[in-house]
Amino acid sequence: MKKIFMMAIAAAAMTITSCTGNKTAAPVEEQVDTLAVLTEEATTAADEMVSNLGSLLQNKDLTAFQGALETIKAKVAEYIAKNPEIAQTYLAKVQTFLKDNADAIKAFAGKNAVVSGLVDNIANIPTESVEKLIGANDALKALGIDASSLVSTTADKAVDAATDAAAEAVDGAKEAVENAKDAVVDKANETVENAKAATVDKANEAVNNAKEKAGEAVDKGAAAVKKGLGL
């Protein structure tokens, strides 16, 4: 019986391996490119903002124009927190509009120091590279943005997310191993029970055949005795 059980364990293990070994990882193409999605989001937002600024400038709506500049401040801080690269993309587009229309904006803003200050502060943030953007502490602080704090928070979140993902992967692997072990044992037990049942069935069949043959022998013996007695 011990030999049968060990053979069953081996057979079950081979079965489980063949079932799980054919699984393939999801194609790389299926993985979401977060940066590409965020960059597209920032590009769309910048295009919409530029269109809005153009309309407000044309309609001479100074109050709404100031509100739009405040929105740009908030967007820059939001994008730096998400990923400085998309903040660079957003700012570059907005700055192009502000610089190309500098004279018209200056005449439009007139003596409004708040609007003029916002325009200058936004336009003066370096966007040639992510490093220069993040390093422009004074220019960003003029807009009330603490880039170093935002980037640190983003980095901490990324580390936490990576740690959580790694822990989840380890837990998943442990669970898979335990499930595989349970499946192997269950398969082995099933094989043993089937073998036991087959053995019992075979033994019962042999007993029944022996009984049948014994009965036939008795019948033949009785017939021979009767014949010898002339019965």
Image (tube, rainbow, N blue to C red):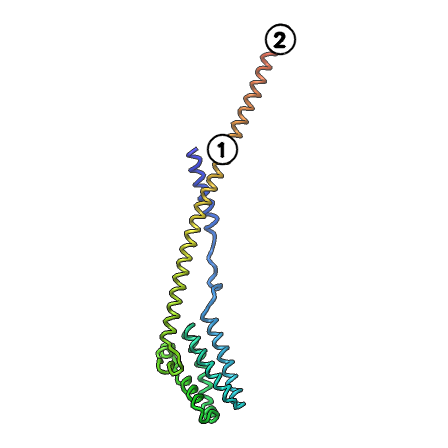
Up/down of 200 relative to 165, above or below: above
Q: Earlier in the sequence, mark 2 or mark 1?
A: 1
Which residue appears at 47% of the width and 72% of the height?
38
Residue designated by label 1: 196
Q: Position of residue 145 (x, y in %)?
A: 39, 79
Q: Position of residue 197 (x, y in %)?
A: 51, 33
Up/down of 70 relative to 214, above or below: below
Q: Position of residue 69 (x, y in %)?
A: 46, 84
User: Which structural element holds mark 1?
Assistant: helix
Category of crowding for the residue at label 2, using alpha-carbon neighbours closer than 10 angstroms: few (below 14), some (14–19), many (at least 20): few
Q: Position of residue 16 (x, y in %)?
A: 46, 46
Taking the view exactly as shown, the residue that stands out farthest to the right is: 231
Residue designated by label 2: 227
Amino acid on which the number 2 mark rests in the picture: Lys
Amino acid on which the number 1 mark rests in the picture: Lys
Distance from disc 2 to disc 1, alpha carbons, whole Å, reads 46 Å
